[in-house]
Image: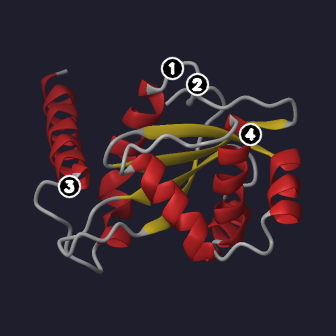
């Protein structure tokens, strides 16, 4: 899914949604936070989570403009305790990871997995692989946020953990050889 752009985006602050079928990059935007707060206040969080699960884990098409999906993501992040706490720890550059991975029981919880500090220029919405690599690098430090419930053996999260492990093993080997 392409990165969502807006005129009021804060440089270096992103919401990164990753799920079973696709990922999305949303630059944090105060205008979109306001839009979400005003227009989605009557919508229950569980309904916002269902939309995100459907789009990012079910591969469903979102029936509306990109700005509407961005408002759903922004509003869910705004309501999250993890986001509220994390943004204070990373006031400048940050990446809020919102996950939507399938559990063993088939449910897809949508949650703020982490709010991670990011260096200026470290993440580029025009290069989605920078977000994937950032997530792989951070995954060992945030795995605890995924440890409360068993994930399906074929969940993308399982594959990402394996990929992250290989990434870190290779990185360690490269450092010892160099």
Q: How many circles with numbers are drawn on the protein?
A: 4
* Pointer 3 or 2: first along the chain: 2
**Dot 3 lies on which element?**
loop
How far from the left and from the top, in percent, is residue 64?
Answer: 67, 41
| Residue located 50% across and 65% down the image | 50
How far from the left and from the top, in percent, is residue 82?
Answer: 59, 71
**Dot 2 lies on which element?**
loop
Mark 4 or 1, closer to the camera: 4
Residue 127 bears which disc, if any?
1
As drawn, 20 above or below 37: above
Quadrant containing the C terminus in the rendered view: top left
Mark 3 or 2, closer to the camera: 3
Question: Residue beneath label 3, please?
Answer: 155
In the image, 44: left or right of 20? right
Residue 124 bears which disc, if any?
2
Quarter occupied by residue 40 = bottom right
**Dot 1 lies on which element?**
loop
Tell me if label 4 and label 1 are in contact, CB under 8 Å.
Answer: no
Residue 67 bears which disc, if any?
4
Distance from disc 3 to disc 4, alpha carbons, whole Å, reads 28 Å
As drawn, 37 above or below 164: below
Residue 111 bears which disc, if any?
none
Q: Residues within 10 Å of mark 2 (few under 14, many from 20)?
A: some
How far from the left and from the top, in percent, is residue 108?
Answer: 35, 66
Tell me if label 2 and label 4 are in contact, CB under 8 Å.
Answer: no
In the image, 50: left or right of 101? right
């Amino acid at each position: 899914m392409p990165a969502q752009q807006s005129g009021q985006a804060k440089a270096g602050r992103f919401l990164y949604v990753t799920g079973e079928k696709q990922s999305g990059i949303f630059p944090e935007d105060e205008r979109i936070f306001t839009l979400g707060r005003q227009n989605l206040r009557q919508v229950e969080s569980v309904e916002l989570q269902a939309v995100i699960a459907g789009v990012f884990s079910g591969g469903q098409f979102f029936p509306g403009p990109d700005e509407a999906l961005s408002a759903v993501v922004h509003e869910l992040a705004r309501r999250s305790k993890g986001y509220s706490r994390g943004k204070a720890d990373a006031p400048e550059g940050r990446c809020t990871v919102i996950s939507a991975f399938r559990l063993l029981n088939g449910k897809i919880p949508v949650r703020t997995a982490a709010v991670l500090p990011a260096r200026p220029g470290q993440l580029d919405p025009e290069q989605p692989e920078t977000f994937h690599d950032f997530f792989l690098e951070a995954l060992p430090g945030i795995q605890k946020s995924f440890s409360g419930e068993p994930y399906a053996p074929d969940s993308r999260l399982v594959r990402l953990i394996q990929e992250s492990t290989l990434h870190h093993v290779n990185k360690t080997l490269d450092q010892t050889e160099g």
